[in-house]
Image (cartoon, grey):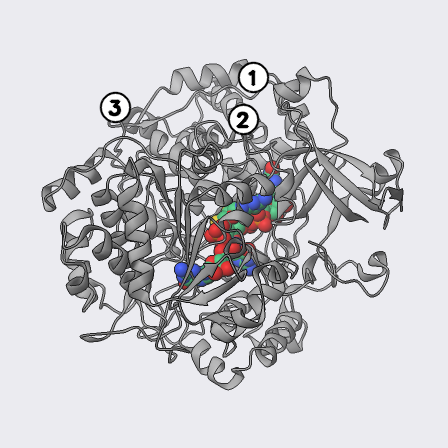
Amino acid sequence: MSHQVDTHPAQRYKPYKGAAGGWGALKSVAHFWLESDNALKNIRTLLKTNQHGGFDCPGCAWGESAESGMVKFCENGAKAVNWEATKRRVDAAFFAKHSVTTLREQSDYWLEFQGRLTEPMAYDPASDHYKPISWDAAFEVIAQHLNALESPNQAEFYTSGRASNEAAFLYQLFVRAYGTNNFPDCSNMCHEASGVALGQSVGVGKGTVTFEDFEHADAIFVIGQNPGTNHPRMLEPLREAVQRGAQVVCLNPLKERGLERFQHPQHPIEMLSNGDRPTSTTFFRPALGGDMAALRGMAKFLLKWDREAQAKGKSTVFDHAFIAQHTSQVEAYLEVVEATSWEHIIEQSGLTKADIEQMAHIYRNAERVIMCWAMGVTQHRHSVPTIQEIANLMLLRGNIGKPGAGLCPVRGHSNVQGDRTMGINDRPPAFFLDALERRFDFKVPREFGHNTVEAIHAMLDGQAKVFIGLGGNFAQATPDTPRAHQALQNCDLTVQISTKLNRSHLTLGKQALILPCLGRTDIDRQANGPQAVTVEDSFSMVHASNGQLQPLSKQMRSEPAIVAGIAAATLGNKPVNWLWLIEDYDRIRELIADVVPGFQGFNQRARDPGGFYLGNAAGQRRWNTASGLATFKPNALPADLIHEGIRARGEVPDLILQTMRSHDQYNTTIYGLDDRYRGVKGQRDVVFANEADIIRLGYKPGQKVDVLSLWGDGRERRISGFTLLAYDIPAGQAAAYYPETNPLVPLESVGDGSYTPTSKFVAIRLEPARDNGRII
Ligand SMILES: Nc1nc2c(c(=O)[nH]1)N[C@H]1C(S)=C(S)[C@@H](COP(=O)(O)OP(=O)(O)OC[C@H]3O[C@@H](n4cnc5c(=O)[nH]c(N)nc54)[C@H](O)[C@@H]3O)O[C@H]1N2
Ligand SMILES: Nc1nc2c(c(=O)[nH]1)N[C@H]1C(S)=C(S)[C@@H](COP(=O)(O)OP(=O)(O)OC[C@H]3O[C@@H](n4cnc5c(=O)[nH]c(N)nc54)[C@H](O)[C@@H]3O)O[C@H]1N2
Ligand SMILES: [Mo]
């Protein structure tokens, strides 16, 4: 897919000099408002964002302080709300006008811009159009397919991270009662490595900090994350930390604008005086995948300093009392720290020894440290060991389980963490299944199910025949795009439960359904009146969300109601009376309280303003690991970051590519074609590279290229006609936007132990772009 261009692409790129936030953010919000068709209503809606009695922002999973009265939305939350709260409709008339084949020719931006899905539709192959279908008939089609499968493991039940706790709980109950743990979800592509790594290290796969801890930290490390674009409300605590003299250290190959300076668009004085404030104090630019080496180098310095201090009888660098009381395997860990060579660390980290020493100094001098990370850390082959190295470093100085300190994987989707808590998990823990079995009268499947990558393989191989998506854009968000589309096409039935039209709706199984659902902003009315749902943020705070807007059509249904409809058609009244449950979501919450730890008294606590804290055992220094102690993980640094399959073929990449988000997108939802903080306007088909690399490889800035990725399987993976932008990026690296670059990410290139596609480390080669065989 390519976008229309009017001027030469190189002319539409100009480095951004301003701060993050500020007038640009306001201008951008204003622009989106005016485009939404619903401007006045949306301003009122926005003021309800993240307020008691209002709805949870569908933007990101950052939490907020309990302080009331503050305006709790950001530029991107405003865009997300506005995008959902449009008056445009994609209804029967729309589908009568556009065939599926013609819709496929439209851009992702155009598809979602057409508005909200308002009635259930079924694909009609004879006319190549979607046609209306009744809800009951749609549920019957699904039930017939599911009940006809030889095994429940032939169906895949995908979840994106916006589904509420209530929807997610019902969904997993239905799917397990049906008989499978096939729960591919967006978390598999996102923070899976954080869950796996922290589960082994500290016994809980979630962050250990709360919002208040940010106010007490002496140092905050932000690793592989771009909060200016993806978690803008995080800039505020970072800026405050800098103002009160704390250290904020960023590890990011790109000098992301929000990480340097931030201007608060809701503080008029700051904007008038142009008084933008720094958000970070120190910035380091590692190689892609170089973080584990950098952290290992820090550990090496700490070990050296600890020994020197001990020899001189001074106070030590490690927290020996904490280590002795709370941890195991420190000796094994310190042995691998010692065995790791500086040559290896420097070569792999892309940093100098002096850089690493400076980071180690900052870390050592701070009494309370928070480490935050996101996709720059989790989407690598060695993400699990990298996150365990973060935990190792934090354990050395007792930085887990004290105020102002802790681990902070910053989640993506607004309820991705809650969905896991509710049991959306292809590898569910035994305690969860035991609790389900105790509460309900059915044999819970114990065999692990498919994650996202395994689900694609199963559909490609013809093993899985039914795909149901509770939100998301499966075919575009997953790796190896043509194969992901083929996987859906192989199915007998594909079902998309969605708010908006996207490309996954246009890749059809033999039968295909679109089921339109309510979003966070919509009023959800059931038999017992308007219903609230609940969500959990990155800090394990659970709170209620109440929709505010009249739904566009009576035909739209809530996610819990759709799940209940499918379940009732498939299983009848087993193991629960599904339709009775959705008359009042308090009934669903009572079941959650019975099954999920930490949710006792859920209905009452969900009504507390500001919500309630689920607690975190590791944050209280209780370690739910096999040994009952926090565990140092003695992982070796990877010998070589380039995959052995590529080496075996003797191929040498031109560059290593990371695939990332622009400022004007929410995952596969493209709001616009600008990336303000990186200075890109009106285009997305670009490759950021270092000017010296562009020239070394025989190209010119502004030139169009094809990008091919290297992998050991001989399959060609190519994207065509991308413009090379000379950018401030470390030598040897490239960056480009997802989802356009997903055709380059091999389905087989996944994280060890996490199965997460390695979206931040793709070995690529460039070729001059070809147009009808002619080089242009
Ligand atoms: N507006 C907006 N908000 C969002 C989203 C969105 O698309 N739009 N998506 C949501 C979701 S689901 C998620 S998961 C989060 C994602 O939030 P982020 O993780 O911030 O998202 P990415 O754009 O993938 O950015 C990764 C950052 O990591 C850096 N990076 C890449 N590779 C490496 C590396 O090897 N080492 C280091 N140290 N840094 C590296 C990149 O330069 C980039 O700054 O945001 C959530 N919020
Ligand atoms: N190359 C590369 N690939 C990546 C990533 C990357 O950094 N690089 N990031 C990965 C990450 S972190 C993630 S989380 C995944 C995201 O993968 P997904 O979660 O599958 O994708 P989204 O783009 O968030 O899904 C957007 C669609 O969700 C639907 N939707 C929106 N709101 C709602 C709602 O309230 N209910 C329902 N039912 N539907 C709704 C709309 O129809 C919309 O079109 O992508 C992953 N893929
Ligand atoms: Mo994500």
Q: Residues within 10 Å of mark 2 (few under 14, many from 20)?
A: many
> Is ligand 1 closer than 8 angstroms to the Cβ of mark 3?
no
Give the spatial CA distance, label 1 vs label 3.
26 Å
Name the residue that disc number 1 marks.
Answer: 340
Residue at mark 3 to residue at mark 2: CA–CA distance: 24 Å
Q: What residue lies at 50% left-to-right and 45% top-to-bottom?
A: 489
Which of discs 3 and 2 lies nearer the camera? The answer is: 3
Give the percent coordinates (x, y) of residue 609: 27, 69
Residue in front for this viewpoint, 377 or 212: 377
Horizontal and vertical percent position of residue 577: 14, 58
Left/right placement of residue 696 relative to residue 337 reads: right
Q: Would you say the residues marked 3 and 2 are in contact, meaning their CB atoms lie under 8 Å apart?
A: no
Residue 716 seen by the camera: yes
Q: Secondary structure at mark 1?
A: loop
Q: Earlier in the sequence, mark 3 or mark 2?
A: 2
- Could you say which is closer to the camera, residue 676 or residue 190? 190
User: Would the CB of label 2 be found within 8 Å of ligand 1?
Assistant: no
| Distance (Cα) linking label 2 and label 1 | 8 Å
Q: Which residue is mark 2?
A: 296
Q: Do tag 2 and tag 1 residues touch (Cβ < 8 Å)?
A: yes
Q: What residue is at 89 percent from the left and 47 percent from the top? A: 776
The residue at which mark 3 appears reads as 627
Residue 296 in the image: state x and y as whole percent: 54, 26
Residue type at mark 3? Ser
Q: Where, by quadrant of the figure, is residue 138 drawn?
A: bottom left
Position in image of residue 416 (x %, y %)? 39, 51
